[in-house]
Image (tube, rainbow, N blue to C red):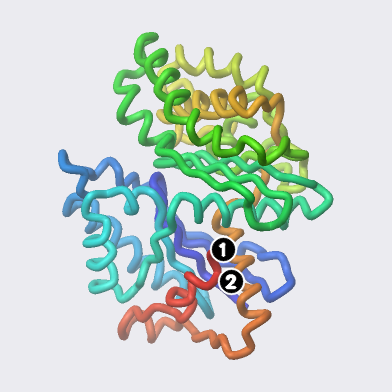
Amino acid sequence: MRLGVLDIGSNTVHLLLVDAHPGARPVPFASHKRPLSLVAFLDGDGNINEAGQQELIGFIREAWAFAGQHSAEDMLAFCTSAIREAANGDAVLARVQAETNVALQELTGPQEAAMTLVAVRRWYGWGAGTILDLDIGGGSFEMAIGHDEQPDVAASVPLGAGRLTRDWLPSDPPSAGSVKDLRHYIRETLAPAVQEFDGAGFPDLVAGTSKTFRSLARITGAAPSAAGPYIRRELRREDLSLWTQRLSAMPASDRANLPGVSLVRAPQLLAGALVAEAAMEMFNINSMVICPWALREGLILKRFDHLLYDSDAPVRPVGTALVQKALEPAPAVERLDSAIP
């Protein structure tokens, strides 16, 4: 079947269509996305302003039409920290549903961490032993460790690369003082979360997920995305520390010329590198692998698990006529809670 996953993130809004069935790996079929930093639309009180809400609603309508045009049979729709932490997040979700009939499921930080660990576990298998996964988003940083598929510990802190860039690195290139202050803030914020992992044991495998970790691995020498998902990619702390120093002296325009770094994400790469460096130091990690699967894939896999064990879980075509008529949410939107621990 063809499943759509609508991901309202902090940096981009993204619809991914995949073909899969219970017990199979999801194969990407088509994608529709655009840069949309909702945090850039926050007013002084932390509310997503009218312009930001209009951008969001417009994309959701586009995404739903795209899904219908490509014969999607089911849909998951979720949002993360950008809406979760906005002062008017609940009102935005209500407006989205009223104007598009799409019910976005708001994920908590620990839920994000848990579902990402599901994806990493499925990718590397049980033979990987205990896994620690780190994921740097635009608004938050998730961590999870587990020797099974569900985490023994999962945590989330407001250390997203976009958020930190906006709040701490206003100049381009940043001043030495602002970088020093941000380093201190990251470690101060991260320390209590890292302490939650005391007693969880040392991981057999450490994985980094998210575009930030992929970009950092690429600039430190990992294979390009064109080499395919099955090439082992690593990020070493020694290399990361060297590149963090280099990035701190670069304007965003120079970072955008680095391999694997997009123009959109170049401004926040330094903040992401500082978070990654601090986390590797505080967890005493010398190197990590880069996992090609993350939150979206975790939700997809759990959704198909749900179908496998629930023969009464129907799917409904998302045809063009349906889109034109009412933009009705697919049943999976309503059942997303059942796929999240």
Decide if residue 331 is on the left or right side of residue 40: right
Question: Of the residues shown, which amino acid type is indicated by label 1?
Answer: Leu
Which residue, as the protein is rendered here, is positioned at the far right? 127
Q: Name above or below for residue 145 compared with residue 299.
A: above
The image quadrant that residue 45 belongs to is top left
Q: Position of residue 287 (x, y in %)?
A: 71, 28
Decide if residue 127 is on the left or right side of residue 106: right
Which residue, as the protein is rendered here, is positioned at the far bottom? 312
Q: Which residue is mark 2?
A: 303
Q: Residue at x 42, y 18 (%)?
A: 184
Q: Which residue is mark 1?
A: 299
Which residue, as the protein is rendered here, is positioned at the far front? 199
Q: Residue at x 51, y 44 (%)?
A: 155
Q: Position of residue 5 (x, y in %)?
A: 50, 65
Residue 102 visible (yes or no): yes
Decide if residue 8 is on the left or right side of residue 19: left
For the residue labelled by badge 2, is the local secondary structure a helix, a strand or a loop?
helix
The residue lying toward the viewer, choosing from 59 and 192, is 192
Q: Name above or below for residue 248 compared with residue 128.
A: above
Pick the quarter of the image with the N terminus: bottom right
Pick the quarter of the image with the C terminus: bottom right
For the residue labelled by badge 1, is the local secondary structure a helix, a strand or a loop?
helix
Question: Of the residues shown, which amino acid type is indicated by label 2?
Answer: Arg
Q: Name above or below for residue 105 compared with residue 234.
A: below
Residue 69 visible (yes or no): no
The residue lying toward the viewer, choosing from 33 and 212, is 212
How many marks on residues?
2
Q: Name above or below for residue 237 compared with residue 57.
A: above
Q: Position of residue 144 (x, y in %)?
A: 60, 45
